[in-house]
Image: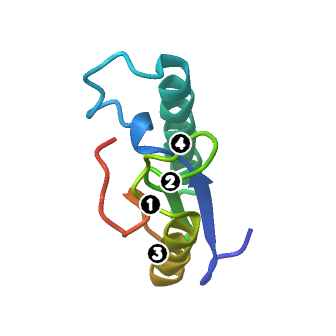
Amino acid sequence: MRDGPGIVAFMSSGLGSVANKTDSYSEIYSASKAALNSLSRSFAASLGRRRITVLAIAPGWVRTDMGGSGAPLSVDDSVRGIVDVLEARAGTGRHGFVDYRGREVAW
């Protein structure tokens, strides 16, 4: 990888937030996304002083087979938001956990 305007993005989930986990809903899925978030942090740390943007991004609760028909967000809206966030953050050299609107999510 080269330093520059690119970005490495991991598709996470709000359910991967250990700080926000207060219930037993979807334990295995939540644990797998928390592990992915940990991987993204380790990956970012391994870059040292290199300026590569690394994000764990949560797409929101989306109307899909997994999210169900009651989810408030369409696939199009989620994808549009994710693209906007990636474009806005690319090249910043920062690491973070954000949602599809660019809001920080607690690790």
Q: Position of residue 67 (x, y in %)?
A: 53, 43
Task: Identify the residue at the far right of this view.
Answer: 1
Precedes in sequence: disc 2 or disc 1: 2
Q: What residue is drawn where x is 44% and y is 60%? A: 73
Decide: marks 3, 2 in contact (CB < 8 A)?
Answer: no
Mark closest to the chain's N terminus, 3 or 1 = 1
Across and down, in percent, residue 97 comes to 40, 53
Q: Which residue is mark 2?
A: 62
Residue mark closest to the camera, 4 vs 3: 4
Residue occupying image coordinates x 57% and y 28%: 32
Location of mark 4 (residue): 68
Identify the element where label 4 is drawn. Answer: loop
- Label 2 vs label 1: CA separation? 5 Å
Q: Which mark is residue 53?
A: none
Q: Where, by quadrant of the figure, is residue 16 drawn?
A: top left
Q: CA distance from mark 2 to mark 4?
A: 8 Å
* Amino acid type for the residue under numbered disc 3: Val
Are the residues flagged by discs 2 and 1 in contact, CB closer than 8 Å? yes
Res 83 → quadrant: bottom right
Residue 15 coordinates in the image, percent (x, y): 42, 36
Q: Amino acid at mark 4?
A: Gly
Residue type at tag 2: Val
Say if 2 sits above or below 32 in the image: below
- Write down the residue under mark 3: 85
Mark 1 crowdedness (10 Å alpha carbons): few <14, some 14-19, many ≥20: some
Q: Which residue is mark 1?
A: 73
Is residue 25 depicted above or below 80 in this figure?
above
Q: Secondary structure at mark 1?
A: loop
Is disc 4 surrounded by few (<14), some (14 to 19) or many (20+) residues within 10 Å?
A: few
- Give whichever of 9, 79 is nearer the camera: 79
